[in-house]
Amino acid sequence: MVQIIAFANQKGGVGKTTTAINLSASLAAIKKRVLLVDLDAQGNAGTGLGFVRASHSQSVYGVIMGTAKVADNILSTAVPGLHILPSSQALSGAEVDLLDMDNREYRLRDALKEVSGYYDYILLDCPPALGYLTLNALTSANHVIIPLQCEFFALEGVQHLINAIKEIKIKWNPNLDILGVLLTMYDKRYGLTKAVDEDVRNTFGDKVFKTVVPRNVRVSEAPSHGKPALFYDFNSSGAQAYLRVATEVVNKLEKGDLNV
């Protein structure tokens, strides 16, 4: 059965899209069939995989609006086994367009049913806001990964997100669970990083991934070359961290070891 994972955090700049790109590539590298859905109007997930918006007409926007089929809007990437359903500038108007639509909370969920049998994993990169696009992702997903930057106000925003996830679970998607909190941009040289790490693990316990993603220049450089870190510099600390995260995800979901 396909595993659908949303990457959510209403705070921007926490490494959410970077995580979506690199975890997608890492899962594909271990022979999983993966679809990455870019729900952010900025379209950075597509850019990070080498796509220039002007070069293709495919977009998740028409899929959500019900004017296009999902299968017609999926693109193959340079990473074997990894496909993408890209974003477009039209998506910036989706929040308003969805207001008057029937079944507006489930537009993405219903559309993805057409292709869910082709993939082992469908990963949803959410915009940095708790609007209808993120709601569509969370009603489609089985699991949520919360990327969390190691900074002072990190936990404050996450608690708001967790409350929203609980509400969505009650009202719209009883199958939704938090798969884990992933610490990103981790720099062990700073005492604050260690303090946030301890605080997060004390708060969320086993829900925090054992692997942390270090602040790594190769991960930062990779999107400008249109490549995931794994294919830009396989031996970099960032690329290797995302491979370990992928292993943790597989162990949790496919082997049932929820304490991994």
Image (spheres, grey):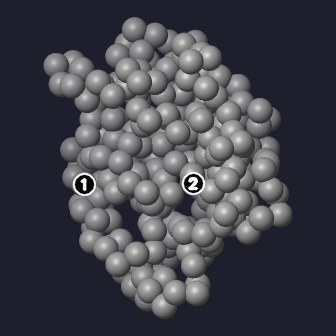
Q: Is residue 19 left or right of residue 250?
A: left
Query: Where is mark 1, residue-wise?
Result: 164
> Residue at the spot x=21%, y=25% of the render?
96
> Residue at the spot x=34%, y=41% of the render?
134
Secondary structure found at label 1:
helix
Question: At which x and y percent is residue 57?
Answer: 54, 13
Q: Can residue 216 be seen? A: yes
Q: Quadrant of residue 245?
A: bottom right
Q: How many marks?
A: 2
Question: At which x and y percent is residue 35?
Answer: 61, 34
> Residue at the spot x=24%, y=54% of the render?
164
* 3D distance between C-alphas at marks 1 and 2: 21 Å
Q: Quadrant of residue 220?
A: bottom right
Q: Amino acid at mark 1?
A: Ala
Q: Residues within 10 Å of mark 2 (few under 14, many from 20)?
A: many
Above/below status of 134 relative to 113: below
Q: Is residue 249 left or right of residue 176?
A: right
Residue sitting farthest toward the top = 67
> Residue at the spot x=27%, y=35% of the render?
132
Question: At which x and y percent is residue 113?
Answer: 49, 25
Q: Amino acid at mark 2?
A: Thr
Q: Quadrant of residue 119?
A: top right
Query: Where is mark 2, residue-wise?
Result: 19
Give me the disc on residue 250: none
Q: Can residue 119 be seen? A: no
User: Which label's residue is closer to the chain start, 1 or 2?
Assistant: 2
Secondary structure found at label 2:
helix
Which of labels 1 and 2 is toward the front?
Answer: 2
For the N terminus, give its image quadrant: top right
